[in-house]
Amino acid sequence: MVTFKMTKKLCLVLGNGFSIDLIKHANLDSNIDVMNLFSKGVELPWPEDGESGFLSFKHCPNLWHLGARPNMSSSAAMTLLENIITCVNVYVLKPRPDLKDGSTKPNQIYINAYFELISYLRVLFSHYNSQVTDEDLKEKTKDWPWINFIKRANDSAEYESISIITYNYDIWLERLLKIHNISFNISMMNGGAFGENSKVTLVKPHGSISYYHKKQNIAGFSIGYNKPIPVDATIDSFCVNDAIPLSNCLVNALIPPAGDTDRMKQSWSGQMRTSAAGMSRELEAGDDLIICGVSYWHVDRSELDEIFTNCSPQTNVFMINPSPNTAMDAVLTSLFSNYIYYNVNRILDKRLV
């Protein structure tokens, strides 16, 4: 039975599929690839001198030795990413000290590849962001159902609040909200407010390229191979910086693909995860939860399950995804009586018209 309320809360849970949908709609595929994260690596400039070739033996020897190449397939790239991060997920359970005789750890190449990967991802997504001006972004998304729906929801008296839990590093959404003069704040982040009297709140538990650590390596850009894993920091160690300088942050606030937040236990991520859980806990009977592009990997499931199980069973739940994870679909049917699945985003045009 569908429950109707005079005013409702709206919560969006967004994964990589949300960014993929935007990129395809705006015809940005030739310059931006968020599915195969190595495909543009040879075009990516090294921040210190601007020379193309960040993904190379010169700058990322460990990734290169493990087979990272710009011409590898998406599936091969994802397998390599998962292998690297799985090693780190296990390594953080009980880090091994350097052996006294100076010999290397058996899996040192994977650990060093992780350090290269974290730096690479921040620069990669910062580079992608710089490829599109606000004018182009506004023009190319003027008929994109997602931003038009969010704008209508923000303007409508039907929703008293809008919470957005996004696992994406990019800041396309934040830029679009600003372009459309939609006030918002980023939960817990210094400098994360835009406009006044906002009813939109964002939280990014897996980090963002705009999370700027207050301490920088003034010696210039480099890969910090000798840092502990993880390099921990609380949320008050960061501020939001949309200019996204190609800096050498002491801490890159990114949980890489296949990263297990339960094992890595980074304080800033844990604080944001708690905030996301709180958003879902506020959803009552008749409120709306919309899910888009979430993978429901084995390493992500505990986070998503935390969100799903905190909601009221009478929450109106919608999933929009052309290729949904079947296990997540099964879970949603088990938890919510008001669950509807859509395979196209055009359905958003029919909401709040």
Image (cartoon, helix red, strand yellow):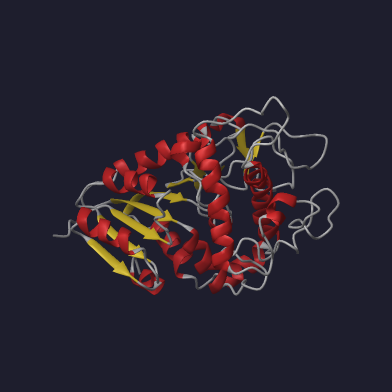
Does residue 190 appear left or right of residue 320 in this picture?
right
| Quarter of the image with the C terminus in it | bottom left
The residue drawn where x is 72% and y is 27% is 101
The residue drawn where x is 26% and y is 56% is 331
The residue drawn where x is 59% and y is 30% is 96
Marks counted in the figure total 0
Residue 161 x %, y %: 37, 48
Does residue 117 appear left or right of residue 206 in this picture?
right
Q: Is residue 203 above or below residue 214?
A: below
Residue 105 x %, y %: 64, 37
Instruction: Out of 205 and 74, give the one closest to the viewer.
Output: 74
Instruction: Out of 292 and 349, give the one closest to the viewer.
Output: 292
The answer to whether residue 180 is seen in the rendering is no
Instruction: Out of 115 and 168, give the one closest to the viewer.
Output: 115
Q: Is residue 229 above or below residue 194?
A: above
Residue 28 x %, y %: 62, 71
Q: Residue furthest left?
A: 1
The answer to whether residue 215 is seen in the rendering is yes
Quarter of the image for residue 75 reads bottom right
